[in-house]
Image (spheres, grey):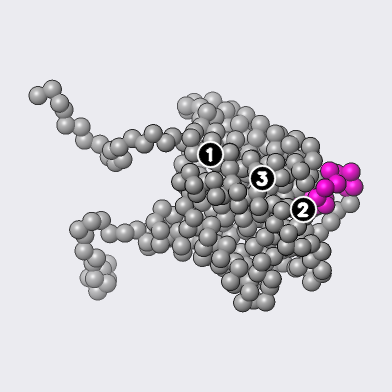
Amino acid sequence: MNNKLIVSTSPHISSPVKTRNLMLDVIIALMPALVASVIFFGPRAILIEAVSVATCVVCEYICRKIMKRENTIGDLSAVVTGLLLAFNLPSSVPIYVPIIGGGVAIVVAKQMFGGIGQNFVNPALFARIVLMNSFPTLMTTWWAAGNFGADTTATASILANIKAGAEVGYTYLDAFLGNVPGCLGETSALAILIGGIYLICRKVIKPVIPLVYIVTVFVLSAILGLDPLMQILAGGLFIGAFFMATDYVTSPLTVKGKIIYALAMGVMTTLIRRFASLPEGVSYSILLLNIIVPLIERKTVPLPFGAVKEPKKAKEESK
C-alpha cells in the first residue's frame, strides 16, 4: 500500500482564503473612510494615518526579529491595525501620539501575546484607551471638519454636546456624511457603511454583530430618552460595529454567542453614554466584551452531532 493513513487535527480541508486576502479586503473596505477623513480634515489626516501604519509595520517587523519568529508583516494585519488606530485619533493630535499608539498596539496588545490570532483584545482599541488615559486633552481636542487645521480652536463633538445638555449644533445629514468634529475615521457613517457592506458582500464578516449592536443602541437610547438616530450616527458606533467588534480573534464564533456579545456591547455603550461621565462608550464596551468572549463561547458552544445534553442534576452530582 502506497497510501498512508495520516492522522491530524482539524481543519482537514485547506481554504484558499488566506489571512492576507482577508486583511486586503478590510483595507479596501476602509478606503471610503480614509477618503472621507481627507475630505473633512485635509492633508493632516493622511499624515497621521501614514505615521500610524508605518509605526505598526515597523514595530511588528522588529518584534518578530527579536523574538526570532517568522515575520508576519506580509499578512497586512499590521497595516489594518495602523489604519484603525489612526481612525480613532483626532486630526489635531501631535505626530508622536500615533507613534506611541502604534507601539502599544503591536508590541503590548499583539506581539506580547504571541502575534496574530493570539491577542485577546483588539490592538487598535487597546492602544486608543491607553492614549485616552495618557493624553486625555489631546485625545479629546477636536477641530471642526472642513477647516483643515487653519482654525485650531477646539470644538465639542456631538456626543459631548449631548452629554453637557447643550445644543447638538449639527443635523442628521451632517452626522451621516461626516461633516462633524470627531476622530478621523468615525465621523462619516456613510463611508463606514459602504465599507461594512463591502465586507458583508465579500463574506469577510457576517451582519449579525453590527446589526444587533446598532439596533440595541438605537432601541435602548429611545427608551432612555436620548435621540436614537443621533446616537447611532454620532461617535464611533459604526466603525466599532463593522470593523472592531467583528474581529475574528476577539469575537465569538457561534451565532448565539455573537448575538449575546453584540447585545451586551449595545447595552453597555448606551449606559455609558447616558449615565457615565464619558460621552462615548464604544471603545470600552468592545474591549470589556473582548475579555469575556471565552465565557460567552463556553456557554453557547453547540453540542457535537449525536451528543446528548447531560441533565443538570447529573452535572451537579458529578461535581
Q: Relative to residue 175, is residue 116 depicted above or below?
A: above
Q: Count of labels shown?
A: 3
Q: Is residue 29 magenta?
A: no
> Closest to the observer: 297 or 216?
216
CB atoms of marks 2 and 3 within 8 Å: no
Q: Secondary structure at mark 1?
A: helix
- The spot of residue 29 in percent (x, y) is 58, 43
Residue 174 relative to residue 310: left or right: right
Which mark identifies residue 179? 2
According to the image, label 3 marks what residue? Answer: 33
Find the magenta span and give its range.
136-152
Which quarter of the rendered picture does the N terminus lie within? top left
> Would you call the spot at circle 1 few (<14 residues within 10 Å), some (14-19), or many (20 or more)?
some
Q: Amino acid at mark 3?
A: Ala
Q: Quadrant of the C terminus?
A: bottom left
- Give the residue drawn at x 55%, y 33%: 76
Distance Cα–Cα, label 1 vs label 3:
14 Å
Q: Would you say residue 64 is visible in this rendering?
A: no
Q: Earlier in the sequence, mark 2 or mark 3?
A: 3
Q: Position of residue 112 (x, y in %)?
A: 53, 39
- Quadrant assignment, res 271: bottom right
User: In the image shown, does 185 or 5 lie closer to the viewer?
Assistant: 185
- Residue type beneath disc 2: Asn
Residue 263 - label: none
The amino acid type of the residue labelled 1 equals: Asp
Q: Which residue is mark 1?
A: 25
